[in-house]
């Protein structure tokens, strides 16, 4: 019969060596056995930075993964009906154990999103990115989700708000580091040149703007904005060479894709 290892009586370096042989799920379970164990494991995990992903879908998913080694992680799912006190408890446990460098919030069912944002703020965790991927029956939540996303550095909208969607006239310009719209049929010239122009990076697919709309956008971009990169995919192929001749800009002969 194997002799139990007195883990907490080992020297710190020996204890770390034992932890290094375990997967993160096993370490996590051990950390919940006592306050002393939790303290030692928190010290051990403090060497790593973790990305925390909270996905409000069915099921609710909470995941922590090491930023440097993505295979080193843990994932928890709640299969039952949403119970925010349980969600709060699980997020608080993760926040108390892992050194979290980035929070990603994925929203498929939006009703709990405002409370989730407040929870992360109460734990002093800044939300890096919000991903919106709503069901068709949740179209009325887009405006709320977009406004809520202003607390994050980056916003991605995967789902389709439909072409009828409109932002309120009172909407303030966005200041995202990255704004990605995968169904941009609803985007107007006003949104592009007034609300999106001060995002650092802008990615849009399925745009349906006119030649004059893009000309106005490019002029505004050159004139005054903090926009660094714009990648716009249009349904129709357009020849922009005549347009660029009207702009006070230097064309480049070699096309280089961003990030490559």
Image (spheres, rainbow, N blue to C red):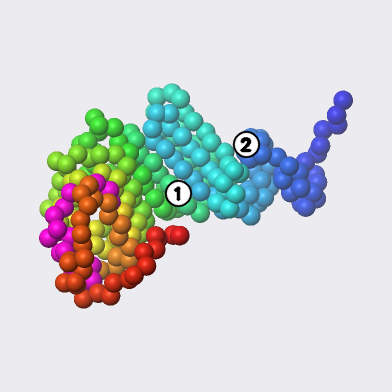
Q: Which residue is mark 2?
A: 25
State the residue at coordinates (19%, 72%): 245
Q: Nearer the viewer, residue 99 or 193?
A: 193
Q: Is residue 26 magenta?
A: no
For the question of whether residue 207 can be seen, the reply is no
Quadrant (top left, top right, bottom left, bottom right) of the C terminus: bottom left
User: Measured from the top left, where is residue 135 in percent x and y?
Assistant: 29, 32
In magenta, the rendered stretch is 204-223
Name the outermost residue toward the top: 80
User: Measured from the top left, where is residue 173 in percent x and y?
Assistant: 22, 59
Mark 1 packing: few (<14 Cα in 10 Å), some, or many (20+)?
Answer: many
Q: Nearer the viewer, residue 139 or 248?
A: 248
Asked whether, in this view, residue 193 is left or right of residue 198, the answer is left
Q: Nearer the viewer, residue 129 or 210?
A: 210
User: Measured from the top left, where is residue 156 in percent x and y?
Assistant: 33, 48
Give the answer, above or below, for where 219 lies relative to 233. below
Mark 2 packing: few (<14 Cα in 10 Å), some, or many (20+)?
Answer: some
């Amino acid at each position: 019969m194997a002799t139990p290892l007195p883990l907490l009586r080992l020297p710190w370096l020996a204890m770390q060596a034992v932890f290094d042989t375990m997967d993160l799920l096993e370490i996590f379970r051990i950390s919940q056995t006592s306050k002393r164990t939790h303290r030692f494991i928190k010290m051990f995990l403090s060497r790593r930075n973790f990305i925390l992903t909270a996905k409000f879908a069915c099921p609710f998913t909470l995941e922590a993964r090491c930023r440097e080694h993505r295979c080193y992680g843990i994932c928890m799912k709640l299969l039952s009906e949403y119970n925010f006190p349980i969600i709060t408890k699980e997020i608080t446990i993760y926040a108390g154990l892992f050194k979290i460098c980035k929070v990603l919030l994925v929203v498929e069912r939006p009703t709990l999103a405002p409370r989730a944002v407040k929870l992360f703020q109460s734990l002093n965790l800044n939300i890096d990115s919000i991903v919106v991927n709503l069901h068709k029956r949740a179209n009325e939540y887009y405006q709320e989700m977009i406004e809520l996303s202003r607390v994050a550095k980056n916003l991605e909208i995967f789902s389709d708000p439909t072409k009828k969607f409109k932002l309120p006239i009172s909407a303030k310009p966005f200041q995202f580091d990255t704004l990605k719209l995968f169904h941009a049929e609803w985007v107007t010239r006003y949104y592009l040149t007034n609300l999106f122009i001060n995002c650092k990076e802008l990615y849009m697919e399925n745009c349906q703007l006119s030649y004059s709309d893009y000309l106005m956008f490019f002029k505004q971009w050159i004139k005054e904005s903090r926009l660094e990169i714009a990648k716009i995919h249009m349904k129709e192929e357009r020849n922009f060479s005549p347009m660029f001749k009207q702009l006070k800009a230097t064309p480049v002969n070699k096309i280089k894709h961003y990030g490559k």
